[in-house]
Image (spheres, helix red, strand yellow):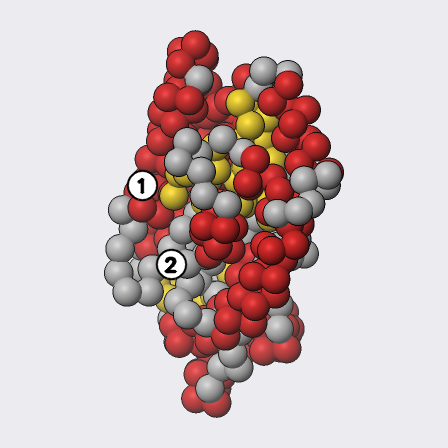
């Protein structure tokens, strides 16, 4: 996300934690990394469990993956690191970050303890997301996910050449299991292209674009919520009108991060008979894999559009 108030609030706390963490190698995270290294597995630390789950599937038994942000109740935009996170990142030979301003804490931790041998994969740079205010929720775009998964396999193969064939075989398995998500998006596009929808944040923005659905509520409402600000009165009125008058077919609601403004919209949708589909920023504990999570969400959207 852009230079939001939520990110600014998290920055000072994160900086303090970095300094503390570098003397905390006795932490559980540092210990687990050492244990994994001792087992001969390639240690990977991912900022988000989305990329961590993909890395674990591609790496299989040859890697040990730790995901920093995996709590379904956590707001990734305001995540504050702790000594365990810093120790994990500082000791990991492979680090995966989302980029696009989503997890700047990773760069701060890396710069505090530089290591020229560390392999850092920035997904946003890898998939070449552009623009002055890019949507950082890259995992909702199948093209980005395919490129990212391929890059993860290539990086693992570079760091562990002996197991390169296994990594690329696992990549093919991952992409096969991911195909139903792409198929579901294609079905939505063929049936509901240009149908009006609403969302409380641009979390599913790439999905909306890829399927040809039309955002019929103010983009500035969603941006304000993402930035941790109160939407303006005009945007709130327009959002409420679209929901109460059923000018949209579905409300895509960030089920992971809420605010009084978004709770009000969600409740209004329930009263107005507008289907609400929850979308999240990290993989919920109930979902076994990244692709199953995305398939389930896409299928829920497809079902809601058909009501």
- Callout 1 touching callout 2 (CB < 8 Å): no
Q: Residue at x 38, y 55 (%)?
A: 100
10 is higher (above) or lower (below) than 238: above
Q: Residue furthest front?
A: 23
Q: Quadrant of residue 162?
A: top left
Q: How many marks?
A: 2
**240 or 288, which lies in front?**
288
Look at mark 2 in the image and give the residue it sits on.
135
Image-based side of 286 in relation to 215, left or right: right
The relative height of residue 280 versus residue 164 in the rendered view (above or below) is below
Dot 1 surroundings within 10 Å: few (below 14), some, or many (20 or more)?
some
Q: CA distance from mark 1 to mark 2?
A: 15 Å
Marking on residue 126? 1
Tell which of 225 and 111 is nearer to you.
111
- Where residue 163 sits in the image (x, y, percent)? 45, 12
Residue at x 38%, y 72% (from the top left corner): 219
**Mark on residue 55?**
none
Left/right of residue 215 with respect to residue 251 in the rendered view: left
Few, some or many residues within 10 Å of mark 2 (<14, 14–19, 20+): many
| Residue depth check, mark 1 versus mark 2: number of the one nearer the observer | 1
Viewport quadrant of the N terminus: bottom left
């Amino acid at each position: 996300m852009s230079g939001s108030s939520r990110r600014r609030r998290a920055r000072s706390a994160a900086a303090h934690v970095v300094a503390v963490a570098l003397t905390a190698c006795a932490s559980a995270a540092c210990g687990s990394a050492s244990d994994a290294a001792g087992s001969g597995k390639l240690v990977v630390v991912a900022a988000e469990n989305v990329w961590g789950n993909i890395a674990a599937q591609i790496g299989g038994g040859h890697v040990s993956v730790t995901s920093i942000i995996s709590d379904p109740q956590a707001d990734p935009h305001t995540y504050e690191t702790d000594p365990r996170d810093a120790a994990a990142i500082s000791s990991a030979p492979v680090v995966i970050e989302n980029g696009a301003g989503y997890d700047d804490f990773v760069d701060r931790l890396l710069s505090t303890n530089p290591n020229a041998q560390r392999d850092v994969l920035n997904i946003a740079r890898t998939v070449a997301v552009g623009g002055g205010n890019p949507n950082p929720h890259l995992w909702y775009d199948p093209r980005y996910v395919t490129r990212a998964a391929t890059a993860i396999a290539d990086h693992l193969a570079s760091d562990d050449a002996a197991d390169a064939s296994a990594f690329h075989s696992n990549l093919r398995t991952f992409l096969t299991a991911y195909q139903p998500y792409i198929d579901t998006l294609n079905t939505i596009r063929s049936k509901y292209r240009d149908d009006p929808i609403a969302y409380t944040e641009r979390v599913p923005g790439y999905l909306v674009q890829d399927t040809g659905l039309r955002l019929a509520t103010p983009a500035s409402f969603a941006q304000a919520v993402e930035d941790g600000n109160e939407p303006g009165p005009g945007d709130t009125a327009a959002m409420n009108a679209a929901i109460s008058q059923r000018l949209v077919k579905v409300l895509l609601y960030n089920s992971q991060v809420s605010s009084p403004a978004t709770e009000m919209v969600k409740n209004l949708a329930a009263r107005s008979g507008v289907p609400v589909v929850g979308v999240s920023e990290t993989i919920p504990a109930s979902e076994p894999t990244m692709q199953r999570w995305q398939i389930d969400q896409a299928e829920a959207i497809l079902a809601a559009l058909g009501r």
